[in-house]
């Protein structure tokens, strides 16, 4: 089981928790488990086609999964995932 650190913007969708546990053997499975356990996160994390939203950055033990194996990156017992939605703004 992995620990998932939840950013403030998603915390209302997980009952205000800063961290939650989720099962899965890879990053994609862990995120889908999170979305199953907390359905309000589904649309925040995934597109209608089931792909990770492009503005969602995911780190496994401080490594950007995009430079690893993406959603197929293997997750071990005790690993930590951090979800960081990209922020944009300005004019």
Image (spheres, helix red, strand yellow):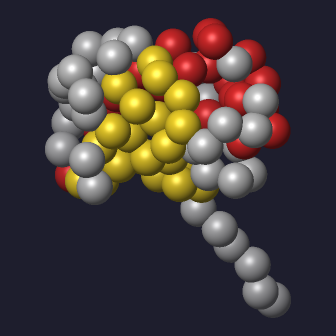
The residue lying toward the viewer, choosing from 1 and 49, is 1
* Residue 83 visible in image: yes
x, y percent for residue 29: 40, 16
The residue lying toward the viewer, choosing from 21 and 84, is 21
* Residue 47 visible in image: no
Taking the spot 74% from the left edge, 51% from the top edge, the residue there is 9
Q: Is residue 77 placed above or below 52 in the rendered structure?
A: above
Taking the spot 35% from the left edge, 49% from the top edge, the residue there is 59
Q: In this view, does 74 lie to the left or right of 81?
A: left
The quarter of the picture where residue 48 lies is: top right
Q: Is residue 21 left or right of residue 70?
A: right
Q: For the C terminus, which image quadrant?
A: bottom right
Taking the spot 70% from the left edge, 53% from the top edge, the residue there is 8
x, y percent for residue 7: 62, 51
Q: Is residue 6 left or right of residue 89?
A: left
The quarter of the picture where residue 45 lies is: top right
Q: In this view, does 83 lie to the left or right of 60?
A: right
x, y percent for residue 43: 73, 29
Taking the spot 24% from the left edge, 53% from the top edge, the residue there is 63
x, y percent for residue 57: 47, 51
């Amino acid at each position: 089981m992995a620990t998932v650190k939840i950013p403030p913007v998603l915390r209302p969708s997980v009952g205000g928790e800063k961290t939650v546990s989720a099962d899965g053997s890879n990053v994609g499975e862990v995120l889908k488990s999170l979305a199953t356990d907390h359905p309000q996160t589904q649309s925040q994390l995934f597109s209608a086609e089931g792909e990770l939203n492009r503005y969602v950055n995911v780190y496994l033990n401080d490594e950007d999964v995009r430079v690893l194996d993406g959603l197929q990156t293997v997750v071990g017992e005790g690993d930590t995932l951090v979800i960081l939605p990209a922020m944009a703004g300005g004019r």
